[in-house]
Image (spheres, rainbow, N blue to C red):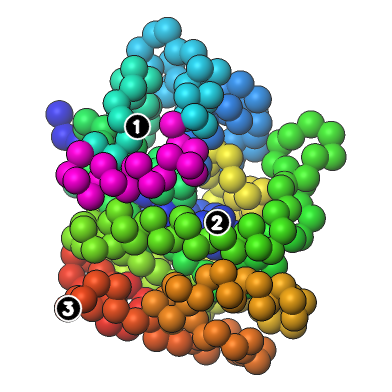
Amino acid sequence: MSRVRVLYLAGSGRSGSTLVTTVLGQLDGCFAAGELRYLWQRGVLDDRPCGCGLPFGDCPLWTKVVGALPPPVDAGRIAAGLRTRLRMRGLPGLLRRHRAGRTAVPAHSDDVVLAALYTALAGALGPGGPGGPVIVDSSKLPPYGALLDGLPGIDLRILHVVRDPRATAFSWRRRRSLDGAPGDRLMSRPPVWKAALLWLVWNAATLRLWGCRAPDRYLRVRYEDFVADPAGTTARIAAFAGLDADRLPFTGPHEVRLDATHSVAGNPSRHRTGPVPVTDDSEWITGLSRGGYLVASTVTAPLLRRFGYPLRRPGRRPSDDRPGRPSDDCPGRPADVAGGRRSDDGEG
């Protein structure tokens, strides 16, 4: 049996991964699955809405997928196990094992069900094109990506989506309702220093795990470059993932037409359908306080230049301006990967 093709979006939160995932889900042979690491808690246990709008337990697709898993399935145990196995304090050990050529995330009895989830989903989707469908998992957390990388039957490729850390820190401070949660619960709003630290840790871990050690399976795309050239960037991602990019969903240079997906968990914007503008939200340039900008810049300085972001606060820029040129990730190698080959333009 052929391995399940998974395109894993890695990086930090509020980096535009929801829009990128939903756009990719419009391509033939591609399925926008959303944040599958949360399927057990937010889907099976909490019964929050699928991207199609139905409660998870009422969605015909997910009902079929969950029904195909090997019994018994203890969603609560799996969810709790993932929280324990993927904690940030375990990251140094994970990276040491990876560097030594060992399995980064130690095997666990739940791995049989986790691997079966992707196999069952691919089976429910049908052929999807040469090599089977491509499942886009936007879980982002590098340790979960490392876990998938060690599971049998999965052909994993990494799409590293990055965004200016000052923009992500500002986005985290906005008040947003928690998708599908009862009452008026809001999404978490970490302080600027914590949002910046998470940005640094998760993006650095993504580079360490795949940026240099698996260049043929790694592609980095900046969100700023995606919104500057949505169609061109989507076509490059499609080529990297082995997808057909002949029919892109864009109706104009900066507008995309979105159909509903079956994405699990994630930002509430995953429910948007119809014509959707693809523009750079630059409110953070003037909206982030001077102190917040200084803190975010200081914390993330080790990776700012590497990803092509200026240290100083930029002026409000047109949507087609680019923030800078990324520097080299690995000595002797250009910065990014496109379709298994490296390019030096910072767009993947």
Q: Is residue 164 above or below residue 219?
A: below
Between disc 1 and disc 3, the foreground one is 3
- According to the image, label 3 marks what residue? 332
Mark 2 or 1, closer to the camera: 2
Amino acid type shown at disc 1? Tyr
Residue type at mark 3? Gly
Q: Residue at x 57, y 22 (%)?
A: 44
Q: Element under label 3? A: loop
> Disc 1 designates what residue?
118
Q: Earlier in the sequence, mark 1 or mark 3?
A: 1
181 or 141: which is nearer to us? 141
CA distance for labels 2 and 3: 28 Å
Residue span colored magenta = 85-102
Are the residues flagged by discs 1 and 3 in contact, CB closer than 8 Å?
A: no
N-terminal label among 2 and 1? 1
**Residue 101 pos. (x, y %):** 17, 44
Q: Which quadrant does the C terminus fall into?
A: bottom left
Q: Nearer the viewer, residue 112 or 295?
A: 295
Taking the magenta stretch, the answer to whether it contains residue 241 is no
Q: Which of disc 3 and disc 2 is earlier in sequence?
A: 2
Q: Amino acid at mark 2?
A: Leu
**Measured Cα–Cα span from mark 1 to mark 3:** 36 Å
Q: Are marks 2 and 3 in contact (CB under 8 Å)?
A: no
Q: Which residue is labeled 2 in the image?
A: 198
User: To which quarter of the image does residue 295 belong?
Assistant: bottom right
Residue 69, percent from left and from top: 38, 17
x then y, percent, for residue 150: 25, 36
Residue contact at pointers 2 and 1, CB within 8 angstroms:
no
